[in-house]
Image (spheres, coloured by chain):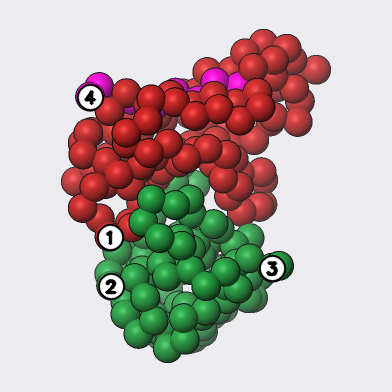
Amino acid sequence: KQEVTQIPAALSVPEGENLVLNCSFTDSAIYNLQWFRQDPGKGLTSLLLIQSSQREQTSGRLNASLDKSSGRSTLYIAASQPGDSATYLCAVRPADSWGKFQFGAGTQVVVTP
Amino acid sequence: NAGVTQTPKFRVLKTGQSMTLLCAQDMNHEYMYWYRQDPGMGLRLIHYSVGEGTTAKGEVPDGYNVSRLKKQNFLLGLESAAPSQTSVYFCATVDVIGQPQHFGDGTRLSIL
């Protein structure tokens, strides 16, 4: 069974510092990996989707990399802002899962002014 | 364009009561999912559907039933609510395999 881990569970950084969030998965046979942001009491907002054939995806200050062979994905957020404070989750779609996704527990990020 | 709409947003039930959560989407997506989110455990898949008239069990299906009679609606039922089902429930949709998931805002359910 695919297991997805996000370490650390919580992270606090000063404004302006770059954020590095990690996601690891146990089975490299994946179809894609998706990063989400969740604000307190809210739903999940999609940030980036990386297909298994891709190495990275970029959107503005966000960059996500994927290393399937080592079972890792990293989300980089450049020049963090207090508005980036949220919980970030990654979800992996196994290759044979008919669309089912396996989620990590998330990393709670606080960016201090 | 509402995307994915979940009703109700909040509900308090007593143990043993039943209720149905509705997920409605206006994007004509094929795939629909029900998750529950508990503190420290991430999201866990309850049931899912790969198209109108189809349903399948996810990771934690016990105590729940689902139906997808119309493509745009996916219903999650609790036949006899238990305190262990206190959670936040999320619905998600996917257009075709390989595309991103789209989430609703969630239903916060408390069972006393």
Q: Mark 3 to mark 2: distance in Å?
A: 26 Å
Q: Are marks 1 and 4 in contact (CB under 8 Å)?
A: no
The residue singled out by tag 2 in the image is B56
Q: Are marks 3 and 1 in contact (CB under 8 Å)?
A: no
Q: Earlier in the sequence, mark 1 or mark 4?
A: 4
Q: Main secondary structure of the magenta part?
A: strand
Q: In the rendered view, tell whether residue B103 sits above or below residue A63.
A: below
Q: Which tint was used for chain A?
A: red
Q: Mark 1 to mark 2: distance in Å?
A: 10 Å
**For residue B2, which numbered disc appears in the image?**
3
Magenta range: A69-77
- Which residue is at 21% across, 53% downward? A96
Q: Secondary structure at mark 4?
A: loop
Q: Are marks 4 and 3 in contact (CB under 8 Å)?
A: no
Q: Mark 2 to mark 4: distance in Å?
A: 30 Å
Mark 2 is on which residue type? Ala
Q: Which tint was used for chain B?
A: green
Q: Secondary structure at mark 1?
A: loop
Mark 1 is on which residue type? Trp
